[in-house]
Amino acid sequence: MSLTPETPQLKFFADLSVQVAAPVEVGHTARGLRRVIPITGGDVRGEGWQGRVMAAGADFQLIVGGTTAELQAQYVLETDAGERIYVHNRAIRHAPAEVTARLMRGEPVDPAQVYFRCQPAFETASASLEWINQRLFVGSGVRLPDRVVMRFFVLD
């Protein structure tokens, strides 16, 4: 019996393309610039399944120091089989100030200039997908002017 913990492996879970609307600016608060980005739709594709991102959620952002975005997105996926999955995705997006400013203006930027990593958590009532309620996930993303593209992995 080994007392050394296993090294987690990453196993592909899904690719998402999440469509977003124009930001709602709350303004500069004591913690940073607050923004809310409405989620308007999109699609999701996993291994052997696919679905859509419902227009039911938003990405709540805090921009700190002009270089780092603390993101908390909450939204719902619906598989083609009609199963619904609640998503709570925490993320950090970091880039030099000039790149962050371009992102905030809705301009395209080279994804290689941006660190964008996330920790999605899922909840579902679906019996066939129940296993996702008991797993940890990680991912990476790219912010485009009209959408966010992400790839999620389960820690196996």
Image: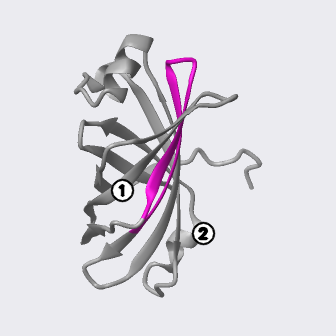
Query: What residue appears at the point 43 percent right and 33 percent down from the top-left corner?
Result: 116
Element on which disc 1 rests: strand
Considering depth in this image, is 82 or 66 the residue closer to the camera? 66
Q: Is residue 21 above or below residue 131?
A: above
Observer able to see residue 14: no
Observer able to see residue 49: yes
* Residue assigned mark 1: 39
Amino acid found under the numbered disc labelled 1: Ile
* Residue assigned mark 2: 134
Contact between labelled residues 1 and 2, with CB atoms less than 8 Å apart: no
Residue 150 percent across, percent down from the top left: 34, 46
Q: Depth-wise, is mark 2 or mark 1 nearer the camera?
A: 1
Residue 76 percent across, percent down from the top left: 42, 68
Amino acid found under the numbered disc labelled 2: Gln
Q: Is residue 116 left or right of residue 71?
A: left
Tell whether position 65 is magenta. yes
In the image, the segment drawn in magenta is 57-76
Query: What residue appears at the point 49 percent right and 19 percent down from the top-left corner?
Result: 67
How is this picture coloured?
one colour
